[in-house]
Structures are given as structure tokens and as C-alpha cells.
Image (cartoon, rainbow, N blue to C red):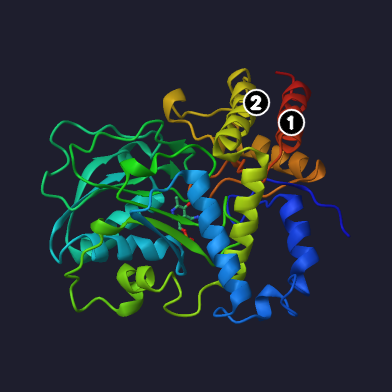
Amino acid sequence: MEKRLYNFAAGPSAIPEEVLKKAQAEMLCYPGAGCGVMEMSHRSAAFGKIRDGAEESLRRLMDIPDDYAVLFLQGGASMQFSMVPMNLAARGQKTAYIVSGHFAKKAFEEAGRWGEAVCAASSEGDGFSFIPELEPGAVPPDAAYLHITGNNTIFGTCFSELPDTGGVPLAADWSSAILGRRIDVRRHALIYAGAQKNLGPAGLTLVIVRKDAVRQDIDPVVPTMLRYAPQIKADSMYNTPPCWSIYMAGLMFEWVEAQGGVAEMERRNLEKAALLYGTIDSSKLFENRVPARDRSVTNVVFTLPTAELTEKFAAACAEAGIINIKGHRLTGGFRASIYNGVGLEAVRALAGLMERFEKEEGR
Ligand code: PMP
């Protein structure tokens, strides 16, 4: 096998080796099934156990109460930008959004197609470099919900605390921090996340929704596949689900449980993040402008002062076996995504390289 390198990809991203090895061992033949997971019917007893096991494990990990449904859907987090308003708000109804990044803005724009989306706070004018605060009265009391993007993958910012919604239900995109830090499900009406960061491979979108938040009198124009209710009723098997991605997410959940749960993931992620932010803050070369309170624990962004140094450091990363570290095309610079699948040794390798680079540059 070729050597696996230090992978800091933002998503799809690193998966723990133990998980990949288990999937590899079971790939040709899932125990007792006579075939692999990719080849079995989603209606089979074997797959039923895989699906139910994944849900049960996630419920334990996130302490999800019984009045919340767990849905394994497709379409990515981007599909939820449309499904959330269509299922939680009446046609034309107000919804409120905190526009804290690229995907938050996309979610806000999609909601505007369905109803009156109100921008309750925004940091767009400052290049999404921080989490904007809600001014009193910014969330209309008749809004169906307030939407936040809990962690902004591109800009490396996150909500350190949930905003005070003033009693309006909270809907959150936790794609890039789910299972990476503790999230109080009870404070949300709905949580969604694309799987390809902390939950395994792409192709699966997780939705956790309080059942009574889902509108029963949904507008007839909403296509069946964009409704939560049929999927809740059918345990996410209204149609063929993303079987392989559900299986892999189940393995990820099992792995997180074996490691000590979400609290342990949070502890590790804080340790990894502290190492990188510490290196950046003590550097005269590397810079991160996010206020300490808003710094993401899962996506650490940083820049160098010139294009020449940026190129040179990118080359040094490649040389050191550090891959997928380039910043998003919107921001440039660098981004180290340090999700659950990225070990401390990878982060140590990066921090060590940054220190050596700084010395070599004579700072
Ligand atoms: N929300 C966030 C916070 C993201 O980081 C991303 C992209 N990775 C998306 C939404 C869009 O996700 P998807 O590609 O699954 O539609």
C-alpha cells in the first residue's frame, strides 16, 4: 500500500484508520450476510440492523431525546438549505438567519425563495472574519426559526455559545463540527450536517429534527422527496437510502463511542486546535485574525504575509507529506481541518513544520 500522508482536507476528509480497516475487512462479505454492504438490499435484515445500530449509537453519542427523529438523507447539507424552510415555515412566512459565512449566506438565499428570509446579523462586510452578535430585536418574534451555521468551514469561525433566539426555534447547520464538540440537541428544533467531515464519506446528510417542529400542513407544492414527514414515517427508507455511507457513519459512531464519546473528541480537538493557534500566535509570520472567542476548533485558517512565502510554505507542506492544507479558493492562505479523524501526530507534524519554516525564514 502507498503511504498515507497527513491529511488536513476540509471535506471529504480523513477517516480514522481503524474505521477504514474494519470497512476493508467487511467489504467483500459482511458477517452473516453472504455479500458486502454495497451489494445488499436496503430492506434486508442485515441492513436493517446496520441502520438501526447507527441511529442508536448516534442517539447515545449526542443524547438525542425520543421526541427527535434521526434522518439519514441524501442531497448534501445544501439540500437542507431548501428543505429546512419548506418543512419548518409556511410559504411566505418569516425566517431569520445569522449570515456568518459562505454556506450561511447560501442557506439564507435559499430560504428567500420560499418565504421572507430576514438577515438577523451578518459579518459579510468584514469578510466573515467573526461571528456576528444578535442585536436586541433582530430576530422577528414571528419567525418560524432562527438559522445558524454553527461552524464556518471556510472562514474558520464557530459559535462558542448558542445565540439567544428569544424563544424562536433554533435550526443549525453543524456540518463541520458535529461529533467534534458537544452540542445540546435540546436547544435546537433541527440540526443538519453533511457527513463528509466527521461522519465518514460523502453521500449522506444527517438531520436531527424535533418531530413537532415539522409542519403537518406542508404546502402541497413541496415534492415528496423534499419532505421530512415521509422519511420520518419510513425510518429514512422512503426510497433507497445511501446504504454504504450509513454503514460507514455507523462505523464512525462506533469508533467515537470506543474512544470515549463526544466529550473526548472535544478534548482532543481542543488540544489539537490549541497547538496550532499557539504556534500561529507566537509566530511573526503566520497569522489568524479570528477573535479568540470565535475561533473554530475544527478548521484552523492561517495566512502568510506574501504570495512568495505562501507558495514556499505550500511546497514545504508537500515535501513533509502534509496534504489538502490549502485554504478555500475564496480566502486563499491555508486551512488545517482537524476533524476527529486527524490525529495529534499529524497536527504536531504541521506545527513542527511551521516552527522550522519560521526559523529558516529568519524570524
Ligand atoms: N455547510 C457547511 C458548514 C459546509 O462546510 C458545507 C460544505 N462542506 C456545506 C454546508 C455544503 O455541504 P454539501 O456539499 O454537503 O452540500
Q: Residue 73 appears in which quarter of the rendering? A: bottom left
Q: Quadrant of the C terminus?
A: top right
Nearer-N-terminus badge (1/2) = 2
140 or 240, nearer to the observer: 240
Please, is residue 95 above or below residue 238 in the view? above
Q: Residue 294 appears in which quarter of the rendering? A: top left
Helix or strand or loop: what does disc 2 sit on?
helix
95 or 302, nearer to the observer: 95
Residue at horizontal 36 percent and vertical 34 percent from the top: 131
User: Hey, what amino acid is under mark 1?
Assistant: Arg
Q: Is 282 on the left-hand or right-hand side of 166?
A: right
Q: In the image, residue 151 lies at what x, y percent?
A: 44, 42
Q: Which residue is mark 2?
A: 275
- Mark pair 1, 2: CA separation: 8 Å
Residue at horizontal 54 percent and vertical 44 percent from the top: 332
Q: What mark, if any, has residue 204 been given in the picture? A: none
Residue at horizontal 48 percent and vertical 45 percent from the top: 62
Q: Is 155 on the left-hand or right-hand side of 274?
A: left
Cβ of mark 1 under 8 A from ligand 1: no
Q: In the image, residue 52 lies at what x, y percent?
A: 53, 64
Q: Is 100 on the left-hand or right-hand side of 313?
A: left
Q: What mark, if any, has residue 348 been given in the picture? A: 1
Residue 75 visible somewhere in the drawing: yes
